Amino acid sequence: MIKKIAIVVFVFLNVSSFAQDKTLKVWPNGAPNDNGMKEPEEKYDGVRVRNVSEAEMYVYLPEKEKNTGAAVLICPGGGYVIEAMDHEGFELAKWLVSKGVAGIVLKYRLPYGHHEIPSGDARRAMRIVRRNAEEWGINPDKIGIAGSSAGGHLASTAGTRFDYGNPQSTDPVEQVSCRPDFMLLLYPVITFKEEFGHMGSRVNLIGNGNDWKMVEKYSNEMHVSAETPPTFLVLADDDTGVPPRNSIEFYLALKENNIPAELHIFKDGGHGFGMNRKNLPVDQWPELFYSWLKAQEIIN
């Protein structure tokens, strides 16, 4: 069954235990730009994907009796070259739904030399969620964004560079704010500075070379402001993939701007733990995040 609401196309999925799930294209009428990828999208090693040239959203909605009204747009990581849709995407969405929070997994277009495309997809996806909030049982003032690793870079880009919509636009989606109301950042890439940045993500997003303007543009600790949303950060001290200083510098920038924030650094866990259970203290992070949502009065 296909149902049209506003300008967004919904395709209802028959997913076990999630009867309300739907998938939709971020740009149903075609994106305003092209990332140049002409090869077919490829799925491998579970649900990791590459060669992504079309952005899609996978919407998981809680049952009405459990619904808190909150929602999280989820950006899986993968160094801006793949996307780990499973333990950094779908599994997180399903856990959120179990807590009465809508989980929307974003399969964003990968850059392939077009740095503006992933964040453009994330902003558009935020607008779509807010535009359809009433239909989906979501409070439009309780829509957050989450991201892991490079997905954390994407989420923190969207959380530091946003707008409140363009009321003059002829596109009703563009009239809606893309500002997240809160952020969940898991072992995020934050900076592109060589001292402690993740060079793989940097090269894949902005290319080789040392263009300081581009490095500054995507060093998100430099763009925190008084309007940046409250943030929950999780990482492991033994992360050898993305230096912990990424999260620490972002936390300090949040505190300089009096933004509510909570930072958890676990002794063990490495990089990329997501929703994978390792029988380590880092496995506590989802319940800690749930408690933080309550403390922030995002949920009751």
Image: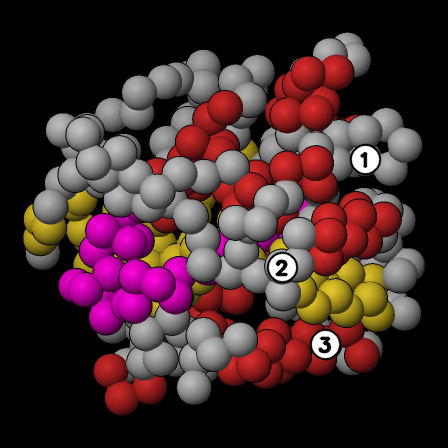
Q: Nearer the viewer, mark 1 or mark 3?
A: 1
Q: CA distance from mark 3 to mark 2?
A: 26 Å
Height in image: 148 above or below 268?
Answer: above
Rendering colour mode: secondary structure
Q: Nearer the viewer, mark 2 or mark 1?
A: 2
Q: Quadrant of residue 134?
A: bottom left
- Decide if residue 90 is on the left or right side of residue 218: left
In the rendered image, residue 226, in percent from the top left (x then y), is placed at 58, 50
- Check disc 2 and report the residue beneath it: 259
Height in image: 216 above or below 62?
Answer: above
Question: Which kind of residue does numbered mark 2 sit on?
Answer: Ile
Residue stretch in magenta: 127-151
- Check disc 3 and report the residue beneath it: 283
- Check disc 1 and report the residue beneath it: 197
Height in image: 160 above or below 279?
Answer: above
In the rendered image, residue 41, in percent from the top left (x then y), is placed at 44, 32
